[in-house]
Each structure stands twice: as structure tokens, then as C-alpha cells.
Image: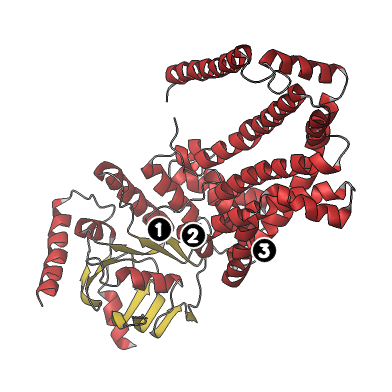
Amino acid sequence: MDDRKTDESAKPALGNGPVLLKLSDVSKTFDSTTQSVAALQPISLEVNEGEFVVFFGPSGCGKSTLLNMIAGFEAPTTGTILLQGRQVTKPGPDRLMLFQEHGLFPWLNVIDNVLYGLRRQPGVWFKRRLRRQRARELLEMMHMQEFEKSAIHELSGGMKQRAALARALAPDPKILLIDEPFPALDALVRAKLYGELQEILVRTHKTILSVTHDPNEAACLGDRVMVFTGRPGKIKAEIPVDLPRPRDISDPQLAQFSSRIMAELGEGLKS
Amino acid sequence: MNGGERKASSVYVILFYLFLLTLWQSLYSFGAIPDYLFPSPLQVGRRLWELGWEGLLWPGIKATLVRMVIGFLVAALIGLSIGVLMGMSRLVYRCLGSLFLGLQMLPTAAWVPMSLLLFGLKEQGIYFVILMSSLPAVAIATSDGIVRIPPIYLRAAKTLGTSRLAMPMTVILPAAMPSIVTGLKLGWTLGWHGAVSAELIKSSVGLGYLLYMGRELNDASQVLGIMLVTILVGLLLDRFVFGLVERNIRRRWGLETQE
């Protein structure tokens, strides 16, 4: 216990809340008929409230598998995942996942997509006006208020991701899981979204876990970057990024961190 | 296709049909086939006009349409429910999927003898034929649509806290809607076949009955005319009811690029 305290004090300003998510010896092996493949070696990790942790690594290093297990889409082969002391068994809005391809429902317009998660919450069905108000606030925060009645296919790629983010934040998840944020967008739109994501982080003190293979993105977003190496996946290094927020993706200081992250990976690839 | 091109291509389509009419008329004028077997477009038009004037045509169309709407609604409802079950259970899919695929091999008219045995000349027999004709198509399309839902919608729904009970109405049916509408469209066409086939033998009103009457009276103009009306009514509904809905949904669901 004392260990943990010293550990925490070393962490950057945002993520110094109590432990929210605790992974103990979580591993994953995929069994097929011919062979079993170890996707992830046992990993232990604690994520504090309000912290932004990035899983960084090449594809096939198990980082997405780990995110899927935290979301509850897959069960770990060994180990336990505890969210505020309760074991994770299935997907739920307390660990909401934001997908690579936005996953917005095309049969609903923008605001109905944002309302979707709110409507699924038990016991809030009667608070119609409150739900709508919350959805509007979120869309406003994402600068999407003029598009609340738009159909999904009318939105640009960046707007789709912003709408998806608003939808993911609506049920007020304890932890937001982001699988490769904004991969299919151009650099300008991404830079803007990084800014907005950090703004949300500062405003809502959300705990966020994200997965990426872009070292700049990792350095820009993370309070802590966990560098994964592949086959079987394991965490090779942990790099705290103690730059003030909001960070600019083109900041030279940030580039130092991203080259450190890459360097860790480079060693990992050689060994 | 932009507006101008579309207009230009419509002109070609109209020209094509004018050409067909001319071809028909000239085949008639050429006199290769006696005119009581092969009437001219004018004769057919005149006969349809007479049928309309005598108050036979419109009630006929109406009777067939009413039967269709009722029979099809029942078929759609049952087909949808079965399709959802098939889509959600692998076992049900494997059992009923093969059965319905097999049933689709049957020409819709092949249900008529069975319906005569079961219902005699009663009206229910026509509904039975419509039901059996369109139900398999609706069920198969619904289940295929469900099986092929992009996994991301299901994952998104789960992570947003959708309960098992809420899944079908909030995600599965809407996500499968493009395929369902295509199935309903096909079901309507097959049901329309079935309705007219059944009326040929079992009814005293309706398009199929008018066809049958034409044959009984050796009136080739009436036979051809009613065939044309059957095509036209079916086509109009296909284009302007199902076609529009289908296009709208496909565009909205992002399956078709906007023009």
C-alpha cells in the first residue's frame, strides 16, 4: 500500500485521484482448433481517476485486446479487472467505448444518437427534458449544436467523431475507452480533435484510456504512456508525460516525448 | 447522374417504349398472326376503355389490391417475426432458412391447387396463396439483414448499455432495415404474382378473374390489356412505394452515395 502512495505522488497533476481501474495479472490467450496463441502476457496496471492513459504499440501487440477486455467485450484468460472494486464481466456504459469507426447509428439523427445511451439508463426514462438538455450541452461542447437534427451521412468525418464523442460522454461513463481515436481523418482535423479532447478532459475530469500506434498522439494525449511490444504482448515501458495541458501536437517539447516513446518501442522490436 | 443526364436518359426510355409500340403495331399491320389472336395496341386500349366504362376494370384492380394489402400485411408481419427469430438464433436459421429457400423455389402459382384443396373457392384461399408467396422472401431477407449487421452497431449498443430485451427494437431491426425493405419489396412482387394466379381460378372479381374472362371469351385484347394493367399497377407500387422507401433508407444508412 505504501508503495502505491509514493507511486502516485510521482504522477502528473491531472491523474492523482484514487484508483479507479485495477488490472491484476490480466492475460489473454486465443485458442483455435490448431493452436493457442498468447496475445497478451499477464499485465497489472492501475488507472487513477481523472487520468489519461495511452496504450501505445505496433499492431498485434495486444493493446486493443486489453481495451476490449476492459470494455467487457472479451473475457481475460487469467486475472481480474476491477472497476471501483467491482469485477468487469460484460460491456456497460460505465466503461464506454469509443470506436475507430464512430459506430453512430445511421437510423437516428445526431441528437437521437446522443440521447440513445441516456434512454438506455434504468430509471431515467421520465426525465425527458433533462436528457434532452444534457444532450444539447454535450453537442454544444463539441461545437455541434447546429447539427443536432442532421442525419449521420450528412456529417464530415471529423463531425462524426465529435458526435460519437458526445454520445459516449452522455451516460457519464466512469472511464472512457478510445480505440484508435480519429484514424481516418486528416492531420488538421485531428489536431483540432486532440485539442477538444483535452478540453473535455480538463472540464469533466474524465478518466480516459486510449489505444494508438501514433507516438505523437500518445505524447499529446497521455498523462502516462504504456509502451507495448508484440507477440506475445506485454508492457515494455511506462513513460509519464508531464507537460501542461492543453498540449499542441506540433509542440517541440512534445516531440521529445514522442521520440522517447519511439525509442522504447525500437528497443522492444530488436529484442 | 446529374439532372440533365437523367432528363436525357428519360427521353431515351420514352423513345424505347414508343419504338416497342410501333413494332407491335407494325407486326399487327403486317398481318402475320390473325388479329383475334394478336390485337393491335389500339384494340387493346379500346378494350381497356370499354372495361373501364362497363365498371369492370376499376373494381377488378381494387379487389386485387385490397386482397394484396391485407394478405401482404399479414405475410410481412409473420415473415418479419420469423426472420427476427432466424436472425437471432443460429439453429432456427439453419432449420427455417433451408425450408424457406426451398419454398421460394416453388412458383407462386403452385400454391393454388393446395389452396383449392384446403379452402375450396373461399376468399381465404387467395389470402393463403399471397401469404405463402411472399412470406419466405420477407423472412429470408429479414434474417439475412440481421446476420449481416455490421458488428460495430452491436458493440456500440452494448457499450451504451442496451439490455438484451431492448436490442431487437432499438438496434437489430433498424440496423437490418435496408435488407428488410428489399425483402418486403420482393415479397410484394411475389405476393402480386400469387394474388393474380389465385384469382385466375378462384375468384369472380379481380385482375386474375378479368384475365380468365378474357380467355373464356376468346378476347385477346382483354387478355393483353389486363396483363398490361397488372404489370403497370405492380410496377407503380414497386417504384413509388417500395422503391422510394428503399432508396431513402439505403441513402440514410450510408449504403448509397448521394447523387
B218 vs A44, left or right, is right
Residue B205 x %, y %: 86, 34
Mark pair 1, 2: CA separation? 8 Å
Mark pair 2, 3: CA separation? 21 Å
Residue A98 x %, y %: 42, 58
Query: Tag 2's secondary structure?
Result: helix
Q: Amino acid at mark 1?
A: Phe
Whether residue A136 appears in this view of the structure is no
Residue ID at (31%, 87%): A2
- Chain to which the residue tagged by mark 3 belongs: A
Q: Is the residue under label 2 in contact with that under label 1 (CB below 8 Å)?
A: yes
Q: Quadrant of residue A238?
A: bottom left
Mark pair 1, 3: CA separation? 27 Å
Q: Quadrant of residue A178?
A: bottom left
User: In the displayed structure, would residue B103 be above or below residue B208?
Assistant: below
Q: Which residue is denoted by mark 1 in the rendering?
A: A99
Q: Amino acid at mark 3?
A: Gly
Q: Which residue is denoted by mark 3 in the rendering?
A: A123
Front in this rendered view, residue B166 or A189 = B166
Which quadrant: the C terminus of chain B? top left
Residue A246 x %, y %: 29, 52
Q: Earlier in the sequence, mark 1 or mark 3?
A: 1
Residue ID at (50%, 70%): A91
Mark 3 crowdedness (10 Å alpha carbons): few <14, some 14-19, many ≥20: few
Closest to the camera, between mark 1 and mark 3, is 1
Q: Which residue is denoted by mark 2 in the rendering?
A: B156
